[in-house]
Amino acid sequence: MLNELTLQIEDLISNNASDFEISKVFKNHIKNYKNSINTILETTGGKDFFVKNTKHTDKFLILLYKYILRKNFGSYQPMSTSIPISLVALGSYGREQLCIYSDIDLMILYEDVKGYNLRQIMEEFITLAWDCGLKLGSRVHELSEIQEAVKEDITIKTSIIESRMIYGSKYLWYAYEKTLNKIRKTEVKQFVLQKLEEHKQRLLKYPLRMEPNIKDGYGGLRESNMVYWMAYIAYGVKSTKDLINKEISEDEYKKYRSSLEYLFQVRNALHNISKKKLDLVNFDVLPELSSKLGFVNKPRYTKERQCMSKLLTSLHNIHFFSSVMVKKFTRILLNEKTSIKFIKSCRIEKNLYLHENKIYTSYNRKPIFLNNFLKELISLPNEVQAFDNSYIYYANKTKLPTKQTKELKKNIKTLLYKANLYPIIKLLYNANLFQAIIPISKKIINQPQFDGYHQLPVDIHSIKALSKIENIEDVYVKEIYNSLSESEKSVAKLAALLHDVGKGRTVDHHISGEKLFKNFASSLGLEESHIQMGATLVRYHNKMSAYAKNEDIYSEKIILSFTGLLKTKTMLKMLYVLTYADISAVGENVYNSSIASLLKELYSQSLPAFENEDLLNESARRIAKLNAIKNLKRYKELSPLMQRKINYISSNQIFLRLKADDILEMAIKAKDVKDYIYKIINEEQLIIRIIRKEPLNLGFLLGKLEFLNIFSMNIFKLYDEKKAFEITFSEKVEEGDLLYIKDIIENSFDMSKTTKLIKPLIKKSEIIVNCNHSAYLASLQVRAKDQKGLFAYIAKIFDDFNIEIESAKLATTKGYTRDLILIEKNGNFCANQEEIVSLICSQE
């Protein structure tokens, strides 16, 4: 292909063609080459393609440069080595890792020699390259200024240490290599510290996620680059491979290199699929990516799951190798020679040091058998919070037995009951010992989750859940956790670690997880009561969340159904703690004030079930709340008439849901309402509170606000035909939108107002009607695809039938809405339920 291009260019030059005509030919060549890449990748692997693509780009740039020289010198062109210009590849291009749509980092190195019009040559070359459509990241440097240039910016030094000669003056290149060697040895400590900090911040920005960034993220190409940079600075080697049998074992390098090769293949495929630079493996691209990489669906695992699982494995391998080796190399570069006095003060036993709650050891420490290693971990002080890379490297080389002996199982049990468990589990995971300690975790290792909810793979999520229990931020949950005994805390932590252990199997993971937990716990010799508690927690680990989000937690029937799963107050406490940890481990801000409030309310409503079931009766709870109100000072100061009105408030739900102070406040506010009053709160969430005597056009109100997601709605009948409404939305709004919302509320008291609502797609099978929800209430449940304006549409139909909504609980999970609407039994709903359901639903 390039030979044809050379002949074309020669022909054009001989006919005195313009730069425009020349660039057009070059441009067509690039286009044809990009179109042929799909075929090339079918037979060429990751690194192999990088090298071929790099060499092709080299030849293309050389051809461009030769054309510029021909143009400027004509028949008097000197030898290329005599012209003081060298084309130097930098960055990934310099490492021969140039991907399809990566920027071509090029340095034009020159020496200002009189007699050559160098600036014109260089400018024409860069201009032509851009005109041809090359994504050239070019920099121009004179040899004498290189050493000063690298001091200005760390990125320049990073690029320059990856230099590779493409074409030009060999004299200039030899001089440059000497300069490069000086650069390598100057300001080493400053460079290393800057790179380490830069790398740390990059990993904080791009941690491991279900849609990983394979360039800048955890285990990505930048981590591999760090190994290269530090190896070059420390030892002057141009390839990490040169350190095999010196600083790196052959097996370590082979495992690392194999994982890196897979990452190269993934990156090539990503660029080829998207036809642009793409380094994020998102769910949209995964189906095509997995096919491109040769994966096919299997009975148990889809091609997407296989592809992502292998990618996660590779990222872990690269991260482990990189973090260990970078630390190993930088110790030398930073001259971290610890004083004898310091070593003695930190030493807790031979080859074991504790400094600032972190455990260190020697990189040269000989490995020991797993049983002895566990004994060492068990003996560590409880204040240990982390393990240095030196200890992770040592742990990784632990000698594993062919099977678990009784003594080994006894030590595993002791280890799992340690008060400070998370740092140890994290160490075992990072050192690839997690599965050796907990064999039932085999299926969840590097197991992706494509449910649209979890942001982490199963194994990482499980370990993070454990960390959330040991670092509880919710004050109320922490108090409950602290009320547990030490053994109960240990069981809760073990359940958090293994709550998803059943995933990756054909059976429901709650059922398989319960069985696996029982088998594992029994094999370790745990107490029978602890086995039952842990198994119950694993079986029902997301029940509390499901009940809180989707059910009427003020219903006696629902509370008894929920508490019947747990049997004891202690189990309720443990499940509450586990639920907090599970939700918190999903991702940042997933456990928010709304979720916290729902869980706390379910916990509070459930407690009486373990003390006195009669208290669950609605009328008994209403009386108890009324008695609490009567004891308030403000109530006693009210007139007898007002006191009677409060006693005869129509809504039962207000006494079940609100505190005594809040009920009294609402009742007093309602006293002077002639038409309506309202309040807008826009703090963590938008909340609209309305007390009205005039009819409220609810369908219009919700229809106009359909651009917001409703979280919950409560409607309370008060007295004198007055009603209170509280509508909570899932997020706050911009301050500029508050005036607009104010206008909507005020217009909602005009019953002639209408708004056009799009009919949602709801099947009859997605509607459940229960006219015997409780003595006073009927219910309508909707389990349908989440759609804007869905609840507003239902509210409009209810308005038309004069149906009174008592309350509404709205939740969305994995793209589906789970709405529970409680309706006052006034004869309008149950008598017309078939017609109402028909109006709500679209045709099957």
Image (cartoon, rainbow, N blue to C red):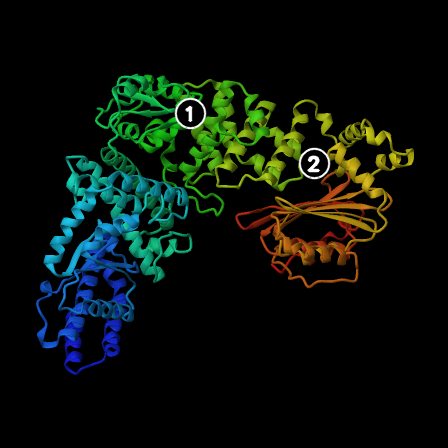
Q: Where is residue 188 in the image (x, y as percent from the top left)?
A: 24, 40
Discs 2, 1 touching: Cβ within 8 Å: no
| Residue 270 spot, x, y in % from top left | 33, 56
Residue in front for this viewpoint, 462 or 767 = 462
Task: Identify the residue position indicated by label 1 in the image.
Answer: 421
Mark 2 or mark 1: which is in front?
Answer: 1
Query: Residue 555: which numbered mark, if any?
Result: 2
The furthest residue to the front? 114
User: Where, by quadrant of the figure, is residue 387 drawn?
Assistant: top left
Q: Residue at x 66, y 56 (%)?
A: 705
Of residues 223 and 538, the one nearer the viewer is: 223
Q: What's the residue type where badge 2 is placed?
A: Ser
Q: In this view, does 527 lie to the left or right of 791?
A: left
Q: Which amino acid does label 1 sit on?
A: Leu
Q: Residue 366 carries which label?
A: none
Query: Which residue is at a point 85% across and 42% down the rendered structure image?
Result: 671
Vertical order, 366 against 262 (above or below): above
Q: What secondary structure is marked by label 1? A: loop
Between 793 and 373, the residue placed more toward the observer is 373
**Marked residue nearer the N-terminal end (2 or 1):** 1
Which secondary structure lies at badge 2? Answer: loop
Q: How far apart are marks 2 and 1 (CA)?
A: 39 Å
Q: Is residue 665 left or right of residue 587?
A: right
Q: Which residue is drawn at 79% across and 49% down?
A: 677
